Amino acid sequence: RAHLDRIAAVDGDVHAFLHVNAHAMDAATDIDRRRAAGEELGPLAGVPLAIKDVLVTTDMPSTSGSRILEGYMSPFDATVVARSRAAGLVPLGKTNMDEFAMGSSTEHSAYGPTRNPWDLDRIPGGSGGGSAAAVAAFEAPLALGSDTGGSIRQPAHVTGTVGVKPTYGGVSRYGAIALASSLDQVGPVTRTVLDAGLLHDVIGGHDHRDSTSLTDAWPSFAQAARDGARGDVLKGLRVGVISELDDSGFQPGVSASFRAALAMLEAQGAEIVEISAPHFEYGVAAYYLILPAEASSNLAKFDSVRFGMRSASGGTVEDVMAATRDAGFGDEVKRRIILGTYALSAGYYDAYYGSAQKVRTLIQRDFDAAFEKVDVIATPSAPTTAFRLGEQLGDPLQMYLNDVTTIPANLAGVPGISIPSGLAEEDGLPVGIQFLAPVREDARLYRVGAALE
Ligand code: GLN
């Protein structure tokens, strides 16, 4: 009730939600009833959960921020949603996002932007700005996001929240409307590292419906966070700092906060080690070939026949399809479909997509080499604090650069966490520090994150 009241009070300004669950109170009452009847419920039973609109739900529309899916109702729940319900979490509603998760500001949503609760003139990050803003504005205690190039971690950075991109394959993508299937991962958005661990424990683990789902038995991430909070995990921890990532391109307050966090780590016994990752700087370029290529293929299913809207323009099947996609997709989506189709076309495939895949392998090798020397890698989570609405909207390349430090993790499949590291001196806005760990070592991120928090 408190969260529904809070949504009613502030969401007119923040616009974190695209849809509020009209049955949330019923679901919560049902949990109370089950608990009263003596049923053993998990630690998150009865806790409200905001769900990024990229995740399909049977009882609320799922639009992925696009006009083309306006009002679309899914016949099934995403696995992460089904697992959350089974654990007694109460869906509060669906959160706003850049259309099909393309963006770093939530301004590409077809339903209007979300605003940063720290300053309503500023962006909440993207694409999962709705989930991050909901958590930061105390409209929800927990949220689900998806991260293809940074869409959980960069919004966490600009809203002072915690965001985790799990190891690729660690959390099911079944029912997550695909942006780029080899990069997408679902993960938690919360206010504390322990909360993220609790939610990760609920949503993670093998799912036979996702062919890329890992069959590993995972440790408890909540336990990892509790272990980290007890201290001493930082003693002797080798923290890698990438020598090629100097201060250029980073806002001074972001760099200062990062260095202060490193000093704190050192003071608690961690060893800061310079490492080289010479191919990281090509991450954004490779990503913006691989992502549009996969996205152009994934979005081909929105053909006016199978899902969502259909233009009433008439004419041939092809006319209706073209008119529907013209009216249903926004500019950024069209831009990426064109880029991706071009990159995949015969004659250009090797030059663009093929080269980008090679760069991806080189970035994976940079990680492999680095993790022989260090336990985790630390970077600022993003180059700047929250910028003003409209500031980067006319400059797609500028917008793409917001993910310079988050993209390599998606290309390599490694896990990453962003936790608040303080406020930038020049504008008083939140800054995050990112930690990256080897594939399957998500627990390490929870230990380190909770120790520093
Ligand atoms: N900003 C990145 C993009 O626009 C991140 C997207 C994401 O992680 N979903 O592609």
Image (tube, rainbow, N blue to C red):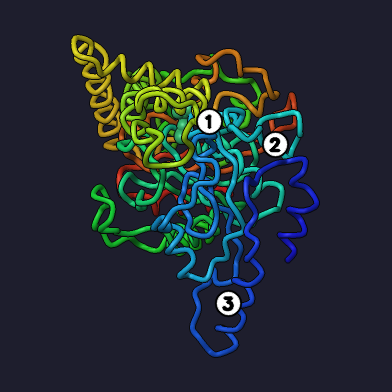
- Mark identifier at residue 31: 3
State the CA–CA distance, disc 3 to disc 1.
40 Å
Quadrant of the rendered image containing residue 264: top right
Q: Can residue 393 be seen in this view?
A: yes
The crowd level at tag 1 (other Cα within 10 Å; few <14, some 14-19, many 20+) is many
Q: Is residue 375 left or right of residue 162?
A: left
Q: Which amino acid does label 3 sit on?
A: Ile
The residue located at (34%, 46%) in the rendering is 167
Q: Which amino acid does label 2 sit on?
A: Asn
| Residue mark closest to the camera, 3 vs 2 | 3
The residue located at (51%, 47%) in the rendering is 62
State the CA–CA distance, disc 1 to disc 2.
19 Å
For the view shown, which residue lies furthest in the bottom direction?
Answer: 37
* Image location (x, y in percent) of residue 398: 54, 15
Q: What residue type is labelled 1?
A: Pro
* Position above or below: 17 against 251: below
- Could you say which is closer to the camera, residue 446 or residue 10? 10
First in residue order: circle 3 vs circle 2: 3
- Could you say which is closer to the camera, residue 232 or residue 256? 256
For the view shown, which residue lies furthest in the front direction?
Answer: 315
| Residue mark closest to the camera, 3 vs 1 | 3
Q: Mark 2 points at which residue?
A: 116
Q: Can residue 405 be seen in this view?
A: no
